[in-house]
Image (cartoon, grey):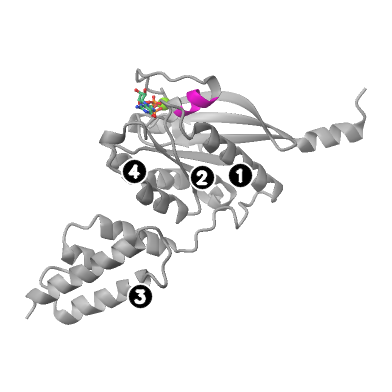
Amino acid sequence: METSAQKRRDSKKSLRVKVISLGNAEVGKSCIIKRYCEKRFVPKYLATIGIDYGVTKVQVRDREIKVNIFDMAGHPFFYEVRNEFYKDSQGVLLVYDVGLRESFDALDGWLGEMKQEMGSQANMDSIVFIVCANKVDLTKRRVVDEGEGRLWAESRGFHYFETSAQSGEGINEMFQSFFSSITDMCENGGKRPVSDVSVGFTKEQADTIRRIRNSKDSWDMLGVKPGATREEVNKAYRKLAVLLHPDKCVAPGSEDAFKAVVNARTSLLKNIK
Ligand code: GTP
Ligand code: MG
């Protein structure tokens, strides 16, 4: 017969967690989960209707973790169904398709929906976020590169993994890291350990690099109106230079962004009297 001390020890070792998947429709959320839980891939698209629920047990160090997975439908049509499932999650899989820029751009909107639904309960520091750049097997149609995805994720303290539900690439590593970070967080009193993802650059730096990469012309890159004066151009340049100078900024892509800003300023000044 189990003694009560034994029971206490066992219950300390076992853990129950809730994770959810988020991202646009058709990015591969259900396939990523299926690849991990059932070791198979389904090429035919079967849209999730509202929510799919499943349970899996995993071992992290000396603990058995019972993971409740709520796989959300990405289609806006199912908003009413999924909105009540955000609460009490310890982990979030944020998925986008590397071949569809709008699915990457939509990640901020997904975080927004989640915060809104969690309301005053929203404590993003008590949740482990993993960003999955999915469908990396389709190399020819890729439009969001690793640097851009990693920058977005790591500047927010999120983990970043390149995955393919089709080939299985990155899937086990991603889930192992996910569950072990959730366990670390639970053992740390429900707070994400500070050193979990250490990046050494700010969100402002990361967002600026992203904005520069996506700017449509030199005016846009410097953040000034077309027809701005030399002073305005120089002022905007100096602000960006301080933020992105390679001596001060270690964010991936900062060197290219800095060079682009220098070039943009030079070409604008050439044409301003
Ligand atoms: P919703 O449930 O509608 O939100 O979509 P979802 O994000 O769950 O997408 P799902 O997993 O159903 O996959 C959508 C389509 O993409 C399916 O046709 C999958 O076969 C395909 N797919 C998913 N992951 C991959 C991948 O890594 N590579 C390739 N080539 N196709 C994938
Ligand atoms: Mg699905």
**Mark 2 element type:** strand
Q: Amino acid at mark 3?
A: Val
| Visible residue check, residue 200 | yes
Residue 41 picture quarter: top left
Q: Which residue is mark 3?
A: 242
Q: For residue 33: magenta?
A: yes
- Reading the image, the residue beneath label 4 is 104
How far, Cα to Cα, is label 4 from label 1? 23 Å
Name the residue type under label 1: Ser
Q: Residue at x 64, y 47 (%)?
A: 185
Q: Position of residue 14 (x, y in %)?
A: 74, 33
Above or below for 192 versus 131? below
- The three-letter code of the residue at mark 4 reads Phe
Q: Secondary structure at mark 4?
A: helix
**Residue at (19, 63) in percent of width and height:** 220
Q: Return the residue at label 2.
A: 129
Ligand 2 - quadrant of the structure image = top left
> Which of marks 3 and 2 precedes in the sequence?
2
Percent position (x, y) of residue 117?
Answer: 47, 43
Q: From what the image shows, is residue 12 above or below residue 37?
A: below
Whole-number angstrom distance, CA of label 2 to CA of label 1: 9 Å
Q: Is residue 90 left or right of residue 148?
A: right
| Disc 4: residue Cβ within 8 A of ligand 1's nearest atom | no
The magenta-colored residue range is: 32-36
